[in-house]
Image: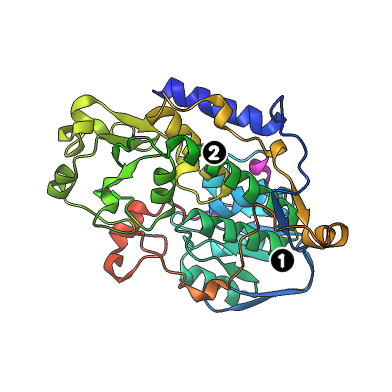
Amino acid sequence: MRSIIALVTALLLVTSLVGGAAGHAAATQPDATYEKCEFPVTVTDATGEEITMEERPERVTTTNPSAAQTMWEIGGQAQVVGLTQYALYLDGAESRTDVSAEFGVSVEKVVGTQPDLVLAPNATQTSSVEAMRDAGLTVYHLREAKTVEDIAKKTTRIGKLTGNCEGAAEANAWMKANVDAVADVTADADQPDVLYPLGGGYVAAGDTFINAMFRIAGTNNVAAQNHTGYPQLSDEVILKLDPGYIVVNDRNATMLDKEPYASTTAGEENNSIYLETRWLNQPAPRSVVYTTHNMTAQVHSDLYSEDTYVAKSEVSVKAESEVEATEETATPTATAEPTETNDATETSEGSAPGFGVTAAFVAMLAAALVAARVDA
């Protein structure tokens, strides 16, 4: 199974970099339009804080890997001066300052990077955000991403704040094209029951970006039937859910050999789906593309083919002002950039232990157990 996923991942990486040999013919309309970046720009973040950027930030520090991955994807990697240990897989990341602490992020290290802007995804604790602001830093706290649309909106917002609006539009158009392509493959397919254990009884359930990706890949997340967020389930509940497949990665590769999972249908039949942690647990465009393709290739191998993948070179974006200037009577494009809303419309606290915990998960032990596993 790992050889399959390695092959698919390698294919996606190579194709993403060099593009397909045969691209789609140029269309009269772009796949998406976008508003050109302008400064100064003022937006409101998940904490209700009004953030103003007077000019394009030259130095950006990210406090969780999803923000770093997004900066790389939209062409803003040269602006990043600080990131966390789980983003060190990104090309060239080793030359940036690692701002990780033993648990979470080191405010002192973030301050030391002298950033013009700090991008703090929901997984960053509110107390850390407040401490960085007290130190005089401009911090934008992103709300929790629960859907692919949320990820697209977050990408658009990061692009707007950092002066990478075109790159953000391209990343979103690429993500949408691949989501649509995978959804076409899985539309009429049987949906096997799956479960993604995070460790310690915690699982990824409904109302999460992980569940959204599972649905696109044509699977049924059994934990989403009666649970949301990242709950801790008892052995009895897991046995009753009886998944046919267990999602594993480098952190929980032996999960099938342990109870209660060993006694489920997945354990008895040795059915697992191997997905890379960096793509599965980080809500960003590349994560959505790679996870949905890799999962579909394993679960629906009889329906999936290499041609399902859409390379970035096959999508096009154009500034709205340019479209209006050249095609005054043009019809709306097939794909538009997500409508932006202030992040303050939703709280910055999510439902997963250790990365925006709700009142139900205030125990520090539970937070420490799961915090490093999923970046919301």
Question: Relative to the observer, which residue lies in front, 245 or 232?
Answer: 245
Percent coordinates x, y for residue 116 in the rendering = 72, 66
Q: Quadrant of the N terminus?
A: top left
Whole-angstrom CA distance, mark 2 to mark 1, is 38 Å
Label number found at residue 181: 2
Q: Is residue 248 left or right of residue 174?
A: left
Q: In this figure, which residue is indicated by the disc labeled 1?
A: 116
Under circle 2, the secondary element is: helix
Question: Relative to the observer, which residue lies in front, 200 or 365?
Answer: 200
Tell me the residue at 64%/60% (across/down). 156
- Start and end of the magenta stretch? 92-101
Tell me the residue at 15%/34% (across/down). 263
Circle 2 or circle 1, nearest the eye: 2
Asked where in the image residue 174 lies, by quadrant, the reply is top right
Asked where in the image residue 131 lies, by quadrant, the reply is bottom right
The residue under label 2 is which amino acid type?
Answer: Ala
Q: How many marks?
A: 2
Q: Is residue 336 left or right of residue 349?
A: right
Asked where in the image residue 326 lies, by quadrant, the reply is bottom right
Tell me the residue at 55%/50% (across/down). 284
The residue under label 1 is which amino acid type?
Answer: Asp
Residue extending furthest toward the right: 326
